[in-house]
Amino acid sequence: MKAGGLKRRVLLQGGSVALMLGVHHIARGATILAVRVWPAADYTRVTIESDARLSSQQLVVGSPPRLAVDVEGIELNTELRELVGKIKPGDPYINGLRVGQNAPNVVRIVFDLKQTVRPQVFSLAPVAAYRHRLVLDLYPEQAVDPMEALIAERLRDAPKGDSAAGSTVAGIAPPAPAAPAGAPPAVDPLGELMAQQSMRPGPAAPAPPVVAGNDRPAPPPVLGTAPIRPPPPPALPPVAAARGGATASRTDRIIIVALDPGHGGEDPGAIGPAGTREKDIVLQVAHRLRERINASTVNGNPMRAFLTRDADFFVPLGVRVQKARRVQADLFISIHADAFTTPAARGASVFALSQSGASSSAARWLANKENDADKVGGVNVGNHEAQVQRALLDMSTTAQINDSLKLGGAMLGEIKGIGARLHKNQVEQAGFAVLKAPDIPSVLVETAFISNPEEEANLRRAAYQESLADALMRGIQRYFAQNPPLARSRQL
């Protein structure tokens, strides 16, 4: 059946809604090389890799929700048939799919969906190890707000015990800055909104874990990584926030640390001699650090970790910054394990942003390499959106950079304390796009060179990852000991 026939048939069925999307330039005689599926709570990505640019036409159908994609200029082959088996039960958007030769040189893929989606379909030119890619990103029609997800996670964990009684690393608990005489008590609307939700009967349970990619099990379920959807400001009455059965005053200050595991999904990051992928290692380290943050306090105020990605999927550099700003994070820590052109390079490094040039040639090389992540991971960005992103990322201030250098110095000292070799003894600076949040102290931690066989072996060991997470946690606490978090209201 032709696409037009499908459209006519569907429109006759019980008020279904159909939307025709764009048509790409036609490619003839292309061969499908590989297909991949990356399910996550944020969105599910399907990529079809070929030896020439593909043309496609899409039809979104409602009741029940489906997405039909006609890929032109190809014949059904083994790789396309394998797409059926790559859909996992935990995928939040795709229930299943069918694939078949719809007409000569036209293969039709029909996705049976679990919910209504907003598909984005675009092509990527060859880059890195990839040839041409046709990308289908399935976003939810109503995106989950990252702040709401963070609150839900905190409410979920609250009955397990009073998080304010959590341990501090190395016994560091800095004094809170004194409020001016006669000043009203500081409020934390995040805590107040949590109190509102905690008093509602039966908060929704978190979604089941999603299988990350197709070749390894999903990491532990962590909420708080959804696309940005600014919600209307909620009403915030002066109530007490429930924390593990106890009540917290309106001055309870929740310290939020944004953890940013680099790469993910289509972008594996650096790959070590033994095949270790950077994206896997940094996600594991982030989960270990998250556990420590969530069990810690600053002057009795609970800490919470927010992950820019909690599974194996790709997040554009600008979106990582936007997510951290959306939850008004107090710190932003991007975790990496890069490679160099020679296996001799080794040692951990910590980087802050520079607006006046890189502090070394190696720092400049590394920043350029990391800033290319969007090209590998694949971003559907128009000219206007690109200009908006650049404007956001060019607002970083001198104060933010100075605070970032202090945070980086505290972390570098703790990493050295676990016996890890340092690539540089001081915090380096370069123009990393992911560090350009104008109002959040931000650092990028290169845990080691994954291209060095010895350091790759260390990164694979759970004991080393634990020690590294301990060191990063101590660095965070040391920074707060010298730079107490300011009392402030969170604008939700």
Image (cartoon, rainbow, N blue to C red):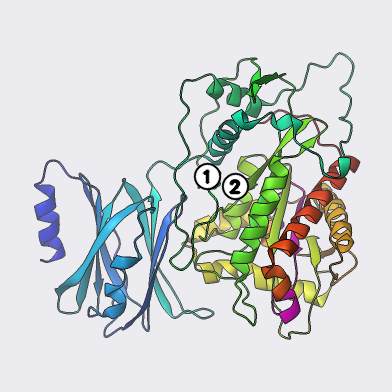
* Helix, strand or loop under label 1: loop
Seen from the viewer's position, the closer of residues 272 and 217 is 217
Judge left or right: residue 180 versus residue 79: right
Residue 439 appears anywhere in the view: no
Q: Which x, y percent locates residue 471?
A: 81, 55
Expressed as whole percent of the image width and height from the top left, the position of residue 473 reads: 78, 50
Disc on the earlier residue, 1 or 2: 1
Reading the image, the residue beneath label 2 is 323
Residue 447: within the magenta?
Answer: yes
**Range shown magenta:** 435-455
Rendered residue at 70%/69% (across/down): 459
Where 172 sits versus 403, above or below? above
Q: Determine which of the numbered discs, if any, sits on residue 228 in the image.
A: 1
Left or right: 130 as drawn, with respect to 87: right
What's under tag 1, amino acid-wise?
Ile
x, y percent for residue 116: 31, 46
